Image (spheres, coloured by chain):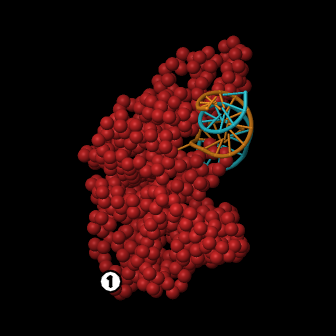
Chain colours: A red, B orange, C cyan
DNA sequence: ACTACCATGAAAATGCTC
DNA sequence: GAGCATTTTCATGGTAGT
């Protein structure tokens, strides 16, 4: 396997005695365990851990976890990733404890402890909270990293400020308490939130528990729903993180102006990521955070122009790997600005051949004849899920027919605006039209008729295509896998849609030994399945409808059966992030886009299962 | 100011079955 | 053509970058 970077944090370090712990504190006070976020163009991200830090150890112990568990969690996850360690700790504390086994946690409310810790994690995620840099720093704060020093003091004081805030909204903290309590009883946080919403903010704990119990019983009667305790924990944790982040953002909005803005991830200009085949670019290295280096490879995609802060959050949850922002206009004739977070090598990439046409003119030669000189477009805009209506093209035709030759400026402007907005092309005199589905397929790099037939409607074709990868772009990034997996690759494809990732790998000539594909829409699964059959694949294709079905248990089975995954790839829904959404652009916590947390849940789970297997 | 943007929901239009 | 299902059309801001 290629990225053989199993953590061996236990190499030269042992947690066996308190003395050692004390000693380590001194040693690592000045060490940096995290580094500054690099500027986009590939300055080294630095190692995420320069050595075992006892402060890390003490911090978790201080958060209420027992020393043995903390030692174990750090050993197994390395020090680089707070997420994994916390995840592991939460796992242990549920799985391994009958409560009396863990007096450290039990003596005070475990939920409160964990909640408080998660709160602090979140405030780290926020990075911004306050600019007070002259507060005293206690030993607890130094482990975060030297680079976060400016932000450290607030990590201490933030509990103060949080309480201050919560006092201003009494129901919030009351809700918080109920949440914590019920979560501690084992109910998923999200369900508790829903219960509070349904039963009202003044509902008693008994009422809420009744509601939750009824909900679980109703669900249990659904045979298809598997809800074993272990995976639920992962799911809970993701939801927990999500909720915490949401709260954090809410607080932040409330407190606008008090705290300075964090330094946001910025989009590169030109948007060529770590390079594209057609633009000159100096080669450079990047060094991934250590936790991101362990197998499997992962590849996450979403819209580049998400609301502010979303990419920062995504990046933090994906081991602080910096996104690679690429506009597909450097690969094909249509723009497609997307961010990709992955831990693939970036050296020796190569493009799919033949290179696709890169102008409208080349891609759609029949439009050349009718293209007016006053329409300067060379590239199409982003191919979206909806197309211009026939009525609109009719209005445009009528507007143009009133004039011989060039229309006046205001008509030109109207026509050009609409053409840009809806990606209309010239198909006759005074006649514009939206793209046909097969043209979209071609522009996105799919085989002709990929989405055609099999019961899918024209509307749904546009929808599925609009939500898909640009194959050439993704294939360029994935091309490095060809040499790494000459014998074939085992892929876990989440939210796989019409199978852009699979098509890309196939076109690259990477044999698909195994594809486990998760896709909710039946039409999309059918498209993938028929593509699979038509391309005479010899590997195994497993369809899974819902990410919820991909429980930890199921993942363990799959890993056991197939020997792990080489690549976890997917783009989570962008509905609530995309600029086109006028109704529910709610950010990452939106209904669909929050499925991002399922992605990291599954990625974390696979990492830990595979990591566990290796030892 | 100007541009672009993996959208949603309701109403209207169209298609399908009987 | 009635009744139902599906598809098409329209109206609907707001964010962030340039």
Q: Is residue A272 left or right of residue A71?
A: right
Q: Residue at x 51, y 66 (%)?
A: A236
Tell me: residue A59, above or below residue A455. below
Judge left or right: residue A411 versus residue A530: right
In the rendered image, the quadrant that contains the C terminus of chain A is bottom left
Mark 1, secondary structure of its residue? loop
Which residue is painted at 59% across and 54% down in the image? Answer: A591
Q: Position of residue A352 (x, y in %)?
A: 36, 35
Query: Where is residue A481 shown, x and y percent of the image?
Result: 32, 46
Q: How many residues crowd mark 1 within 10 Å: few (<14), some (14–19), many (20+)?
A: few
- The image shows residue A60 at horizontal and vertical percentages of 46, 77
Q: Is residue A2 left or right of residue A405?
A: left
Residue marked by disc 1:
A16
Q: Using the rendered image of the protein, determine whether residue A69 is visible from the camera's viewpoint.
A: yes
Q: Is residue A430 above or below residue A583?
A: above
Give the farthest residue toward the top: A404
Classify residue A493 as left or right of residue A382: left
């Amino acid at each position: 396997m290629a990225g053989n970077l199993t953590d061996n944090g236990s190499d030269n370090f042992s947690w066996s005695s308190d003395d050692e712990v004390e000693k380590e504190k001194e040693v690592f006070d000045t060490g940096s365990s995290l580094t500054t976020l690099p500027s986009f163009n590939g300055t080294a991200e630095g190692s995420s851990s320069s050595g075992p830090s006892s402060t890390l150890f003490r911090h978790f112990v201080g958060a209420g976890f027992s020393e043995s568990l903390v030692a174990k969690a750090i050993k197994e996850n390395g020090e680089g990733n707070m997420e994994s360690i916390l995840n592991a700790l939460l796992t242990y504390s549920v799985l391994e404890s009958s409560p009396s086994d863990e007096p450290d946690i039990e003596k005070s409310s475990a939920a409160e402890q964990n909640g408080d810790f998660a709160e602090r994690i979140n405030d780290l995620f926020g990075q911004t909270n306050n600019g007070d840099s002259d507060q005293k720093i206690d030993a607890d704060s130094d482990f975060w990293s030297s680079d976060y020093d400016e932000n450290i003091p607030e990590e201490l004081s933030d509990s103060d400020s949080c309480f201050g805030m919560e006092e201003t909204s009494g129901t919030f903290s009351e809700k918080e308490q109920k949440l914590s309590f019920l979560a501690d009883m084992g109910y998923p946080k999200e369900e508790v939130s829903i219960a509070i919403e349904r039963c009202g903010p003044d509902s008693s704990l008994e009422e809420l528990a009744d509601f939750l119990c009824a909900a679980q019983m109703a669900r249990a009667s659904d045979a298809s729903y598997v809800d074993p305790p272990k995976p639920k924990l992962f799911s809970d944790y993701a939801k927990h993180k999500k909720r915490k982040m949401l709260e954090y953002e809410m607080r932040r909005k409330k407190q606008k102006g008090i705290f300075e803005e964090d330094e946001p991830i910025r989009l590169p200009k030109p948007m060529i990521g770590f390079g594209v085949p057609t633009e000159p670019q100096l080669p450079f290295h990047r060094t991934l955070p250590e936790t991101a280096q362990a197998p499997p490879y992962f590849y996450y995609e979403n819209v580049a122009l998400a609301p502010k802060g979303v990419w920062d959050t995504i990046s933090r949850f994906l081991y602080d790997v910096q996104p690679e922002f690429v506009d597909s206009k450097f690969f094909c004739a249509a723009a497609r600005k997307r961010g990709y977070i992955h831990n693939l090598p970036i050296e020796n990439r190569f493009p799919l051949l033949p290179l696709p046409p890169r102008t409208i003119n080349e891609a759609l030669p029949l439009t050349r004849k009718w293209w007016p000189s006053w329409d300067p477009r060379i590239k199409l805009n982003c191919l979206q899920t909806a197309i211009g209506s026939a009525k609109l093209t009719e209005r445009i035709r009528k507007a143009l027919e009133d004039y011989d030759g060039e229309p006046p400026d205001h008509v030109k402007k109207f026509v050009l605006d609409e053409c840009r907005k809806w990606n209309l092309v010239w198909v006759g005199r005074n006649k514009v039209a939206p793209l046909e589905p097969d043209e979209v397929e071609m522009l996105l790099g799919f085989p002709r008729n990929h989405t055609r037939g099999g019961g899918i409607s024209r509307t749904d074709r546009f929808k599925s295509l609009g939500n898909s990868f640009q194959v050439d772009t993704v294939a360029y990034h994935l091309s490095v896998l060809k040499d790494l997996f000459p014998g074939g690759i085992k892929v876990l494809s989440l939210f796989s849609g019409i199978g852009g990732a699979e098509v890309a790998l196939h076109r690259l000539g990477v044999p698909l030994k195994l594809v486990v594909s998760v896709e909710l829409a039946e039409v999309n699964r059918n498209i993938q399945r028929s593509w699979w059959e038509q391309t005479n694949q010899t590997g195994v294709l497993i369809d899974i409808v819902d990410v919820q079905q991909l429980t930890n248990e199921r993942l363990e089975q799959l890993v056991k059966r197939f020997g792990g995954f080489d690549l976890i790839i997917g783009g989570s829904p962008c509905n609530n992030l995309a600029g086109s959404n006028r109704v529910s652009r709610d950010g990452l916590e939106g209904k669909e886009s929050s499925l991002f947390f399922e992605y990291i849940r599954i990625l974390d789970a696979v990492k830990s299962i595979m990591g566990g297997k290796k030892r």
